[in-house]
Structures are given as C-alpha cells and as structure tokens.
Image: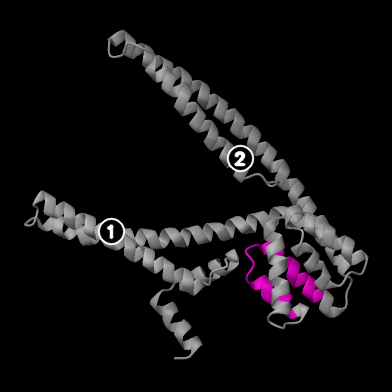
Amino acid sequence: MTEPALKKFTDRLDPGESARRSDYEKCRYDVTYDMWMYRTALLSLSAFSAVLLAGALFVAASGAYADTLALASVPTASAGAAVVVFYARAYAVRSMKEYRGALIDADLVHAIGLMMTMAESNVPLRKMFENLSNLGNVYGDDISLEATYVLSLVEEDGLDIISALRKAQSSSPSWAWQELLIGIAEVYGSGGSLYDYLLVKYNTLTERKRQDVRKYKDHVQGMASVYLSLVGIASMFVSLINLVFNMAGWLSNDSFVWLDALAVVPLGSFMVVKVMRASNPEA
C-alpha cells in the first residue's frame, strides 16, 4: 500500500488522526509522531490491563462471580481507562500547540523589530533566521525553535529559503508567525522591500498589542472588583454560618472561619492569579 493510500485508510479508520498529527508536528517534539502514537498505545494498553487486573482481583476477593453487573463493569471500566489515557495525551499535545502559539504571538513583535534592524542593514534572509535561532533567551525559545526549523529545512532538506519559509509556515502553531513567513516569502520572491513590509507588520502588531494590554487592564480591574466583592460576601457568609452553628451547639470553635482563611481564600486567590497571568498579553 502506498503512503497516500495508507494515510487515506488511517484517516477513514480514525478521522481525528490527521488533526492529531498536525497538532503534534506544531509542538516540535524531538520524538516522531509514529513513536508518540506507539507510546500512547502502550500506555493505553497498560491502563486497560491495570484496571482489568484490579477489577478481576476485586471480583475474586468479593466473591461476586455470579453478579452479571460486576462482571460486565470490569471490561467496561478497563476500556474506559484506555480511552481516557489516549485522549488525555492527545489533549496534552493540543494544549501544548496552543500554548506555543500564544508564546510566539506574545514575543513576535519584538522579533520583528530585530528583523527590521537587520533588513535595514541588508542582512541576508538566511542570516536573519540564524540570528533569531541563537537568541532564544531574548526573543523566546519558541520563536528560536521556529527559526531553527526554517534553517533545518534549508541545511538538511536542501530547500531554498523561500521554499523553506512556505513549508515552515504550514506547520507553525502561530497564525501571526505563519502570516509573517508568507509575507516575507512573497516580498523576497517578488523583489520588494523587506524593510517596508516588516515596518508595516511591526506597526500592526504593536497597535494590536497596545489594544490587548488595554483590554487586559480593564479585565483585571473588573475581575479584582468582583473577586473582592465575592471574598467579602463569602467571609461574611462563613462567619454567619459559624455563629449559627455555635449558637445551636453544633460547633464550639471557629473552624469554618479558619477553613475560609486558610483554604478557601488562598485557593481562590491562586486561581484568580493563574487566570490573570494566562490572559496577560505580555506574558
């Protein structure tokens, strides 16, 4: 069976396979997708076997040999565990792809600023991406990794720089990076001014980031107001419950108040901080 025919067969057998492969390639893992699938299958099989063995031991220990429901639930739970493991790993890959895309979008405007400086000095396009690949600590490891991928297509696969840019953009997790590579390829291939293109792109992304920061500040202010209101109301409610329980003789101390102070408020604060950090356009 030829490779296109095999791919069509696997797509028909598992409609989500192409999407998972695409998501995995955008993560830029060192392990190939086929090896990842092999490990995923092994982990799913291990989960199936572990749950099946645990269920069999439970049935044997409880003596529920004649219980049809118990006997049927063991293989069902085992299959469920295998499915959960498989899709949990697929979800982790998809989340990593989206996370990498967000990081690239956040740092891209700064990388374009560097590229503008190099374009103004007539630095060759290949040298630009080589410099970006070596500046991961300044412009982000994910942009550095994407630049390295472009170079690998040129140096290892023998593509010219324009073909490498077109191929690299198709497997990038960031739409902004894809648009940048497509634009550079078009401008460079048509003999236009790369500096002018990068300047327009830089101004566009700068204005977009300015708007995102403004929206984020408004979002933080609104969330802070709601959070403080909820914390105040929740504290009053917990104190009232604690007082009622004390008056009814069901409680002789301030357990609910301490639970609110030591668990509920810190946990809520932690969750709010995580949400705000995740939505920060400068993160």
x, y percent for residue 197: 84, 66
At mark 1, the secondary structure is: helix
Residue 234 seen in the current view: no
Residue 273 is inside the magenta segment: no
Give the residue at x 83% y 74%. 187
Q: Nearer the viewer, residue 277 or 46?
A: 46
Distance from Cα at disc 2 to Cα at disc 1: 39 Å
What label sits on residue 50 in the rendered view? 1
Give the residue at x 79% y 75%. 186
x, y percent for residue 15: 43, 73
Q: Quadrant of residue 57?
A: bottom left
Give left or right: position of 98 versus 197: left
Q: Nearer the viewer, residue 30 or 166?
A: 30
Q: Which residue is mark 2?
A: 276
Magenta span covers which residues? 163-187
Identify the image quadrant of the N terminus: bottom left
x, y percent for residue 61: 12, 50
Q: Examine the rendered structure and indicate whether residue 69 appears above or below residue 187.
A: above
Name the residue type under label 1: Ala
Give left or right: position of 148 versus 248: right
